[in-house]
């Protein structure tokens, strides 16, 4: 399976590029890219597990919506395999403090229509609700999960 390509979901500025802390990427890069959107500067978008497409992907770079940033490249040594997908986090700085929000609640309809054309008809098809998480909590030991829970946490697109 080829790695997924990672595109900027917004027009904005890269505020940092740093080593990703989970999953080594031997012989490749494994970076977190943090983007501040031009239209919503109170938002922050983080793309995890990205093998950068070039050294031009760096702090201060202005990116366009849809600009190629890299490829999903994360190696799990304990599994002996590469992952070919990204994680994306979005948070908003609000008067009440930082609030995590779903990427799928943050994207506009034009971007969501790309996902919809690949088989997902509702944004809720991507979201695990607080109620679902509360009903099936994950068990942790220090900083590691000791159970995977029972919730489906992966969506396959066609």
Image (cartoon, rainbow, N blue to C red):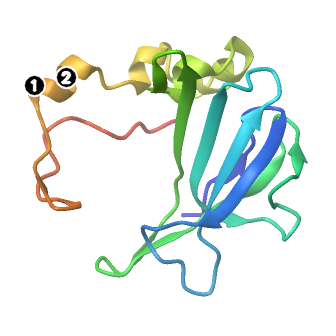
Please tell me whether residue 34 is drawn above or below residue 155 in the rendered image: below
Query: On the picture, is 83 further left or further right than 51?
Result: left
Query: On the picture, is 37 further left or further right than 61?
Result: left
Percent across and percent down for residue 45 are: 63, 38
Q: Quadrant of residue 38?
A: top right
Q: CA distance from mark 1 to mark 2?
A: 5 Å
Please tell me whether residue 148 is drawn above or below residue 54 in the rendered image: above
> Is residue 101 visible from the viewing direction of this image?
no
Q: Which mark is on residue 21?
A: none
Q: Which mark is on residue 135?
A: 1
Q: Quadrant of residue 4?
A: bottom right
156, 80: nearer the viewer:
80
Please tell me whether residue 94 is drawn above or below residue 88 in the rendered image: above
Instruction: Indicate the secondary structure of the residue bearing disc 1.
Output: helix
Identify the residue shown where x is 60% and y is 49%.
Answer: 47
Identify the residue shown where x is 29% and y is 20%.
Answer: 129
Tag 2 residue: 132
Do labels 1 and 2 touch, CB within 8 Å?
A: yes
113, 64: nearer the viewer:
64
Q: Residues within 10 Å of mark 2 (few under 14, many from 20)?
A: few
């Amino acid at each position: 399976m080829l790695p997924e390509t990672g595109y900027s979901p917004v027009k904005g500025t890269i505020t940092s590029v740093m080593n990703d802390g989970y999953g080594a990427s031997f012989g490749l890069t494994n970076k977190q890219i943090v983007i501040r959107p031009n239209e919503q500067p109170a938002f922050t978008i983080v793309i995890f597990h990205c093998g950068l497409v070039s050294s031009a992907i760096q702090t201060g770079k202005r990116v366009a919506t849809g600009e190629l940033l890299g490829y999903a490249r994360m190696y799990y040594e304990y599994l002996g395999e590469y992952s070919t997908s990204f994680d994306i986090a979005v948070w908003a700085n609000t008067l009440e403090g930082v609030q995590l929000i779903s990427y799928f609640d943050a994207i506009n309809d034009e971007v969501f229509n790309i996902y919809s054309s690949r088989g997902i008809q509702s944004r809720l098809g991507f979201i695990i609700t607080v109620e679902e998480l509360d009903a099936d909590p994950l068990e942790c030991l220090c900083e590691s999960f000791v159970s995977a829970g029972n919730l489906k946490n992966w969506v396959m697109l066609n």
